Image (cartoon, rainbow, N blue to C red):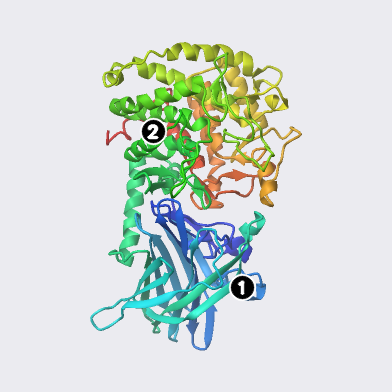
Amino acid sequence: MEFRYGKQNWSTLERGEENCYLMTNGLGGFSSLSLIGSCVRNDQAVLMACLKSPNNRYNMIHRLEEQLSFGEKVCFLSSQDFIKKDRREEGFLVQDGFSFEDYPVWTYRVHGIEVIKKIALAQGENTVSILYEIRNGSKEAASLTVTPHMQFVPKGSLMPEDIKFTFEYIEEQSAEYDDCCAKIASKDVELYLRTNGILKEVPIQICEELYYADDEKDGRNFIGRTAVNHRISMEVLPGQTSVLKMLYGTTQTQLDADEIFIQVQEYRKALADSAGFNTEPAKTLAVNANQFLSYRQSTDGWTILAGFPFFEDWGRDTMIAFTGCCLVTGQYEAAKSIMKTFALYCRKGLLPNLFPEGKEKPMYNTVDAALLFILAVHEYYTRTGDCAFVAEVMPVMSDIIRWYAEGTDYGIHMDNDGLLMAGEKYDQVTWMDVRIDDILPTPRHGKPVEINAYWYNALCIMENFSKAEEINAAMPVNNVDYGLMAARVKECFESVFWNEEAGCLKDVICGGPAENQIRCNQIWAVSLPYALLSHEKECRVVETVYEKLYTPWGLRTLDPEDAQYHGFYGGPQKERDMAYHQGTIWTFPLGGYYLAYLKVHDYSMEAKDMVRRQLKLMEPALWEGCIGQLAEIYDGDNPVKSKGCFAQAWSVGEILRVYDILDCADAQAGHQFSSKIGDT
């Protein structure tokens, strides 16, 4: 799906900075700039390299300053805002177009001279290729000069004023060698450069006071700093066309600048073919779902990064995004690698919520990740029939159930009625996990509704696995009666959670006012495979969620009529955190809503048509914010602009699950077997 934008989209610099592109390299590194090529956040870059996958990211080439000269005139092609507005680079004024399909393409036109810029990020390398096609239709010689602005600092850091760089020519242009190669270094960080342009070292210059509008809105540091120590130029005579090529990487790549673009196209086409979707929005999301998959060096396996540009790989987010980002898209080997990694790190029945870098131990502060792991194994088995793998992880899944039943950390234990309790003191262990010192904006200690829905489904899944001969042939059968445990949960769930007056489920059983708040968490008690409620009550839950919480961009986290509702997300960190789960719209629960809607309407053609119509209202979201992606959150009151992470794994994954069912021949089962099992 090709995304095209025109001059009306950057009528002002501010408008041109509303949207951005994203490319990732499968190592945690990425490239992201605005439609006009500027940095609107400190976390954006032409090359954000990852020196240790997936989270040790360094902002290497932050931005490109581009100037076109002809005759006595000099014109900026680049755009960038500064604290002092008289310093603005306003190349957007001569920018004719922007498009993104597999990589971004900018088109500029000045005085009969057309410049087409393309950037591509190599897969599996911290290497970026930059091409400028210069078509000189004027009667004067034209020269393009590109000045890369560097940082060489960890992502999100402010570059020190006294930073030191070294510049070393490795190979200079000659009659035998067309390209010029150099190495740039700062402390232990190195960057290699290859170009067919005229490369010139210049005295170090520190560029101060870059302005990041999006960071200021979020209460972050909004002033940036970069360094310059070289320039690259190319002259083009009247009537001629030349291509300036630039390669930057943390290693000396063997790839040619043009070759990277071809590889990116082929790679993304293979992803689209593997997923096998019929509609363009689904194809686009399936390909871009791969942007969240990354190699993790510390575990020598695959992982899912929660969101760009901010988040790392978290257990809960991984398990929620897992089905859509891996299974629906046909990434079965990556899926198995992810599950094996988490299985290895299971401790006291808990899965890591975060894998820190270095020697620090994983953090286990999540109640849902382990239960969602069992659901993920079930999804994997349903689609692949891989009995051997299920048998391999059965001891881990059995251990999870045992620890949850007997009690483990963070107050997680089975109560006398068979339902799960979780949370104690200031620990927030569900996905609504914000804590501000000793303030819990969304306290959910007690029996959270979605956790008990996961618990029941995990028990049902384990009951089925324990009875499957092909699974148990490879391992001893334990003596746990999962079916009896599940029956006990189902017997109590409805009587404990049902709120007849509101026509929906209570959010958390805690003995306080939070019990009767109308939140989106109840939708997962309906969308999951094993039903806890009567059909009539499932329908009422879906109707209430639609009435109180639904928007085409996501579900509100709290009923707008609630006294604690916050309809706007923004400002300093504390203000944002107070609104984060108190009305802010999240995209990923919308997947659960659509799955629940289809389920209670028996996957009828009428229900599928309704969901298709509603999904069409979401399609414009692919053009807003991060192109071809779905964001983390929106304002609860008026969701017109994406906020938080501009690309979020579980948002994409959960909506892909819905598209999967809509494309499915067997609507009742909701699984697409034939086209997505080729490698099993």
Callout 1 crowding tier (Cα within 10 Å): few <14, some 14–19, many ≥20:
some
Q: Residue furthest right?
A: 563
On-image quarter of the C terminus: top left
Q: Is residue 48 above or below residue 563?
A: below
**Real-space CA distance between mark 2 and mark 1, rounded to the nearest whole angstrom:** 52 Å
Disc 2 marks which amino acid?
Answer: Ala
Q: How many marks?
A: 2
Tag 2 residue: 343
Tag 1 residue: 88
Q: Are marks 2 and 1 in contact (CB under 8 Å)?
A: no
Q: Nearer the viewer, residue 614 or 292?
A: 292
Q: Is residue 103 above or below residue 530?
A: below
Q: Residue furthest front?
A: 359
Q: Residue at x 68, y 24 (%)?
A: 515
Residue 365 horizontal/vertical position (percent): 53, 36
Closer mark to the observer between disc 2 and disc 1: 2
Q: Residue at x 51, y 73 (%)?
A: 227
Q: Secondary structure at mark 1?
A: loop
